[in-house]
Amino acid sequence: MPLHDSAAVAASGVPDASGHFGPYGGRFVAETLMAPLAELEAAWRRYLPDSEFQRELRDELRDFVGRPTPLYLAARWSRSLGGARIYLKREDLSHTGAHKINNTVGQALLAVRMGKRRIIAETGAGQHGVACAATAARHGLPCVVYMGEEDTRRQAPNVSRMRLLGAEIVTVNSGSRTLKDALNEALRDWVANVDETFYIIGSVAGPHPYPALVRDLQTVIGREAREQCLERLGRLPHALVACVGGGSNAIGLFHPFLEDRDVALYGVEAGGLGLDSGRHAAPLNSGAPGVLHGARSYLMSDADGQVLPTHSISAGLDYPGVGPEHAWLKDRCRVHYDVVEDAEAVEAFHALSRNEGILPALESSHALAYAARLARELGPEGIILVNLSGRGDKDLQNVLEAQAVPGAAA
Ligand SMILES: *Cc1c(COP(=O)(O)O)cnc(C)c1O
């Protein structure tokens, strides 16, 4: 199936030529980044629709990533909830354990086409860093990964994985020492080394064309899921659920369904310790429009426009911004954005592990928890599809710590 299938293009109609999704998106960067972004945009426009590029990408996704990922009926878990049937799109079975690699293999192919011989990346949960490191190794390209100090501690196994894959890890000690600070450092590196360097952004955030480029590479999730549903169930689900950090696994699943008005779309942000506590990472639910990392979108900021610190039990959702296309989908009410708190996500982690023999990523556990709520609402006739964005092996330490806190887990 072509990447730019007509349905997807019709559904988006965005971004416009200047990279705007309605009032969101755009390119708010230093002058020094304008030329490299224009060069990247030209490559995106030229190569993504190109049949030779697509053939190569399809081969990479099949042989290196392991696509298509299965559609799995979580039968025991669904029964235990007493409601709708819940299907899982098994991105956790992708090479390196999450959806992130769909994007890195595509951007790496662009890097090769553009003659860039060095890869840099930022990472939060470490999943994007691992995916970049693996992809760079596979192409014989050196790879530097920027990671906040706080995240290197929370995600130590992924730091080891990246090093074993040959990547150099640069620990970032500025700010809150998490993903947003790593992103700033990676942008700085790019400005300094732009001639030979390709910057692989890990989500649908950042300046144009990244939100559109990453989306195009992640829609393989939704295109496969749509086909699998029609083939296996003879119909589309009533609802799709995905967690939203930057928003790439969610937009990748949702995008091919945007024109299917009967399919309800739910994006789940990290409610952390509760919206009232201020300790969360839910810009769409409690933030306001502003500019962060080169694009206009919802973000968590105070009255003076200062970016607020965030909290989530899952490093991959611990980000104060969100991709601009989600901001636009929120304003147009096509996707409903809600929150799930840490404790409820941990509860869903345990429920899926015990009932299905699958350890989900804590990020994905937010989507699972929300699906459990929906399943009870929809009743036994309902069909829900959840994007299981990644596997939970990286999160074992956090889950064990959460259990040690009285009342934190059911
Ligand atoms: C990085 C990550 C996320 C969050 O990123 P999105 O761009 O919002 O998809 C979600 N789940 C997993 C497993 C991740 O690694």
Image: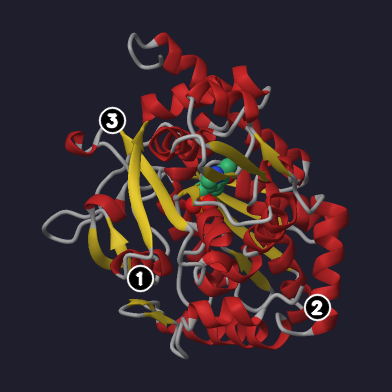
- Residue type at mark 2: give it: Phe
**Circle 3 sits in a helix, a strand or a loop, which is it?**
loop
**Circle 2 sits in a helix, a strand or a loop, which is it?**
helix
Where is mark 3, residue-wise? 273
- Judge: label 1 CB < 8 Å from ligand 1: no
- Judge: label 3 CB < 8 Å from ligand 1: no
Q: Sequence-wise, which precedes: disc 1 or disc 3?
A: 3
Mark 2 Cα-neighbour bin, 10 Å: few <14, some 14–19, many ≥20: some
Mark 1 Cα-neighbour bin, 10 Å: few <14, some 14–19, many ≥20: many
Where is mark 1, residue-wise? 328
- Up/down of 41 relative to 261, above or below: below
Where is mark 2, residue-wise? 53
Task: Find residue 201 and report its image quarter.
Answer: bottom right
Q: In terms of depth relative to the viewer, which is nearer, 241 or 182?
A: 241
- Residue type at mark 3: give it: Leu
- Up/down of 8 relative to 384, above or below: below
Mark 3 Cα-neighbour bin, 10 Å: few <14, some 14–19, many ≥20: some
Residue 115: x %, y % from top left: 77, 79
Task: Determine whether, in the image, residue 381 is placed left or right of residue 221.
Answer: left
Separation of residues labelled 1 and 3 (CA atoms): 27 Å
Location of the C terminus by quadrant is top left
